[in-house]
């Protein structure tokens, strides 16, 4: 897809200036509102959008109950439930849930198709947004 717009966001506290996003259309910002507007503008212009969010959006479920709060595979000894992991998870969930509301405000709600990849990594949620035909 040569016209694919790629948008990546690093979640964090907006009030403290710890949120940022970038697009391969030479745009970037530090507010979720400008991210939502950029995605909506691209979709309204007919471009498909791939949106990546840098944050954990799931918790691992393992067989061993003693390991429920342990490190995820590939993350060495740092538990996902440690302070930074919990904070990023909570921030990511609320900011990710907020974005579709803004898409609705941009009058896109009935025209979006979200496709999650078959496998989600520990850090990135892959989301493809495109206009329904």
Image: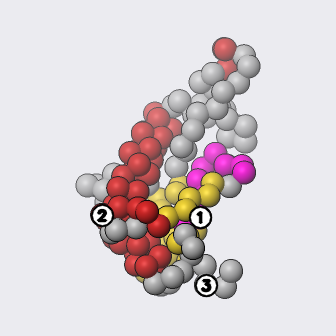
Distance of label 2 from label 1 (alpha carbons):
19 Å
Name the N-terminal-most of marks 2 and 1.
2
Task: Find residue 114 and report its horizontal and vertical position in percent.
Answer: 56, 59
Mark 1 nearby-residue class (10 Å; few <14, some 14–19, many ≥20): some
Above or below for 42 versus 95: below
Name the N-terminal-most of marks 3 and 2.
3
Residue that numbered label 2 is attached to: 105
Magenta stretch: residue 126 in it? yes
Instruction: Identify the residue at horizontal 73%, vertical 42% (top origin).
Output: 74
Residue occupying the far left of the picture: 15
Q: Which residues are magenta?
A: 118-129
Q: Nearer the viewer, residue 76 or 42?
A: 42
Mark 2 nearby-residue class (10 Å; few <14, some 14–19, many ≥20): few
**Which labelled disc corresponds to residue 3?**
3
Q: Is residue 28 visible?
A: no
Q: How many marks?
A: 3
Split into 4 quadrants, where in the image is the N terminus? Answer: bottom right
Distance of label 1 from label 3 (alpha carbons):
13 Å
Above or below for 132 versus 59: below
Residue that numbered label 1 is attached to: 128
Under tag 3, what secondary structure?
A: loop
Under tag 1, what secondary structure?
A: strand
């Amino acid at each position: 897809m040569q016209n694919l717009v790629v948008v990546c966001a690093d979640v964090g506290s907006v009030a403290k200036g710890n949120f940022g996003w970038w697009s391969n259309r030479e745009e970037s910002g530090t507010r979720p509102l400008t991210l939502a507007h950029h995605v909506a503008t691209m979709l309204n212009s007919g471009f498909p959008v791939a949106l990546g969010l840098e944050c954990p959006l799931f918790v691992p479920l393992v067989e061993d109950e003693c390991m429920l709060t342990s490190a995820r595979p590939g993350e060495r000894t740092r538990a996902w439930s440690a302070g930074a992991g919990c904070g990023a998870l909570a921030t990511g969930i609320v900011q990710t849930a907020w974005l579709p509301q803004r898409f609705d405000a941009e009058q896109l709600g009935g025209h979006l198709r979200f496709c999650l990849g078959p496998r989600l990594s520990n850090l990135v949620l892959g989301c493809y947004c495109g206009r329904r035909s």
